Each structure stands twice: as C-alpha cells, then as structure tokens.
Image (cartoon, rainbow, N blue to C red):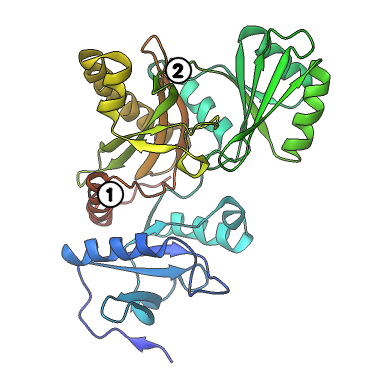
Amino acid sequence: MDIVLHESSPQQVIAILTMSDDERPFRGNHQNFIDLIKTGRDRGVMVYVTRVQDLKLGQKRINGFVYHPESRTWNQILVPFPHVVYNRIPNRKDEQQPEVQQLLKACLKHSKLRLFNPTFFYKWSLFEWLHKSKITRKYVPVTRRLSQISDLENVLAQFQVVYLKPVKGKAGAGIMRVEHSQLKHGPYILRVQATKKSHVTTYSTLSKLWSTVRKASGSEEYIVQQGISLTTYEDRPFDLRVLVQKNGQGEWSISGVGARVAGKSSITTHVPRGGSIQDPEMVLTAALGAEPARRTLIKTRLAALSIARQIEKASGHTLGEMSMDLGVDTTGQLWFFEANSRPMKFDEPDIRKRSLERLIEFSQYISKSKKKSR
C-alpha cells in the first residue's frame, strides 16, 4: 500500500527519471541519486526517483521513491507532481523503447513540466553539429562514416594512425586503432580495446584487416577518425574530462576539469579500461611546462563552453549538463573527442560537490522560467 506524503509541498520538486529493475526498485547509480536528494534537501528542494511507468502526466500526485538515511532504505510513496524531470534513463536501448519515447515527447510538450537533456548524443551527430560553427570546427578531428573498406583506406592515406569508434559507444567500449607499420610482412597494425588492455594483430593487406574489423564491429555503426598524437604523462597519453553545466542563471559554466591517463596497455584513457585519474594542472605542467599548462587550461575551459553552446543550439533541445573529452596534442592544439549528455559522476570531491549543486540550481532556474514554444 502506498504511503502519502503529508508535508506541505516545497517550492520546487525534481523527479529523477529512470527505469524499473528486476532485482532492485529501479535502475541507475543509487548513490548518485542519494547525493542529489540530500543536496536538494539542504536547499529546500524536494528530489525523488520515479520510473517511466510511474510518471503519470495527468495526475497531481505520482508514485516516487524517497530515501531514508537512518534505515538506508528506499520507500515508495505518493509524491507531488514534479516541476522538473532530470533524465537518467540508463542507456540507449532503454531510451529507444516506445513507452520511453512516448513519455519523453509528452514531457517536452507538457505546458508546466520542464525536462532537460531528453536524448543521448550520437558521435556522428556531435561532429556534424560542431562542424556547422566556425568557432567549434577547429576542434574536430577528420571524421568519416565507416561503412566500406574505401572509407578506412581514404583516412589511412592521410594519417599514420586512425581510430574506429562505435557511433553509440560508451566508456571506450568497442574502440579500435589502426596504424601503419614499417614491417614488410605486416604493414598494418590493429589494436582492439578489451577490458583493461588492447589486443594487437598485424596484417599483410588492408582487406584482411578489414575482414577482422567487420567481424569485431558486427551490426554496430562506426566512424573512422584521424588519430591525434596526444601529450603524455609518464609516457602515457592523457586527455581532459570537462564537466559543463548550467548554473542558477541558466548559463553554461565549468563545474570542473579532470585528467584521465591511459592504462599501460590501453588505447583509451577511460578509467573502466584501466585509465587513472590525475590532476590536470599537474599532468599538463609535466608535459608542457608551467606557463603553457596554465594557458592550456584556460583554453580548455573556453573551448568547452563554446562546444556546449553549439551542441545545445544544434540539438534543438534544452540541455543542462554534459561531460566532454578534450585532448591536447604535442603542439598544444586542442581536440574534441566525445560528449555525453548523461555524465557519469566525477570522482574528484570538489567537482562532485559542485555538480550536485549546479543540478539543483539549474532545476530551480528552469522551474521558474517560462517555457519556450517550439
């Protein structure tokens, strides 16, 4: 039997939207949700978790889950209808389900409800969007759709190293690297990213390599991209992970910059693939020197803000946050690799704290601002 929340409704109500689960009340990072609920409570904002089947748009009260720190349990109760929906649908497969699509579209059309970040990003779309602006075009490596061997051949003719990336990839899964080799018996080297390391194979012809790529990629859509010679820390390449969020005035701002250093045998810097978290100023100073490192961090912040504005403009939706991966090559040039509309939580405590505060502040801002008609 549902418990009804009897306390008077707070000024703002935020619903974290996710999916049901067979083993737990709902899917997603529960600790992340607990932290956001606590941050909201500290600021007089009610935050709860609701599932797709519970968010009934025609009702004044819906089923939601609230957390009780004393008992460390989630209780399902009747809660006030939200002003803002924070979209944490876990993955692309869930997002494409008809009932999820229907709900997200209905939320976007709703006269009083505010939903931001309605969809995941797709790699190809991101590069197309950034190419549309003179300001952001310079950060985009040469990128092509990968559908036949000639696509790979053409980009390999321009660059010593290329990366093959799944359009719908996440956390470095499925990434491959192809490079030219000086070996006569194997002029092509293919590295396929596994959990913590990469598997390396040499090929005598491009067609033999292509056959392996086709098997490894399966039915997934891929892009082929110019390989960037990244700056290194202790002989390992690193990139910069930037969290960009809107603040309480509805303006894009930098919540934090972290550095991710590649694992010993990994072709990506992602932590689940063996990468490590480091201080960005420290690794940049080690790679470039103190003053160039300081200038690079300033450039990184400005670039991230420009990229976030362009992605939002080109997407046609209200966005509130994104994380992005930016690389610095050996000449100091900045490059854009990836943006995620549903960022994983940052482990750096200061970035973590700021990210939670910004989510609440921005939600408060949009709950008070007038909805634009599209």
Quarter where residue 95 is shown: bottom right
Q: What is the quadrant of the N terminus in the image?
A: bottom left
Q: Is residue 113 visible?
A: no
Q: Nearer the viewer, residue 374 or 289?
A: 289
Vertical position of residue 88 compared to residue 264: above or below: below
Q: Nearer the viewer, residue 106 or 193?
A: 193
Q: Nearer the viewer, mark 2 or mark 1?
A: 1
Q: Position of residue 56 (x, y in %)?
A: 46, 72
Residue at the location (33% across, 39% down)?
243
Residue at the location (69% across, 20% down)?
189
Q: What is the quadrant of the C terminus in the image?
A: top left
Looking at this view, name the residue that lies furthest to the left.
43
Q: Is residue 283 left or right of residue 93?
A: left
Looking at this view, name the residue that lies furthest to the bottom.
1
Quarter where residue 216 is shown: top right
Name the residue type under label 2. Answer: Arg
- Check disc 2 and report the residue beneath it: 137
- Check disc 1 and report the residue beneath it: 352
Q: Position of residue 234 (x, y in %)?
A: 39, 23
Q: Position of residue 113 (x, y in %)?
A: 36, 60
Marks counted in the figure total: 2
SS at mark 1 in the image: helix
Give the CA distance from mark 2 to mark 1.
30 Å
Name the residue type under label 1. Answer: Arg
Q: Nearer the viewer, residue 72 or 11?
A: 72
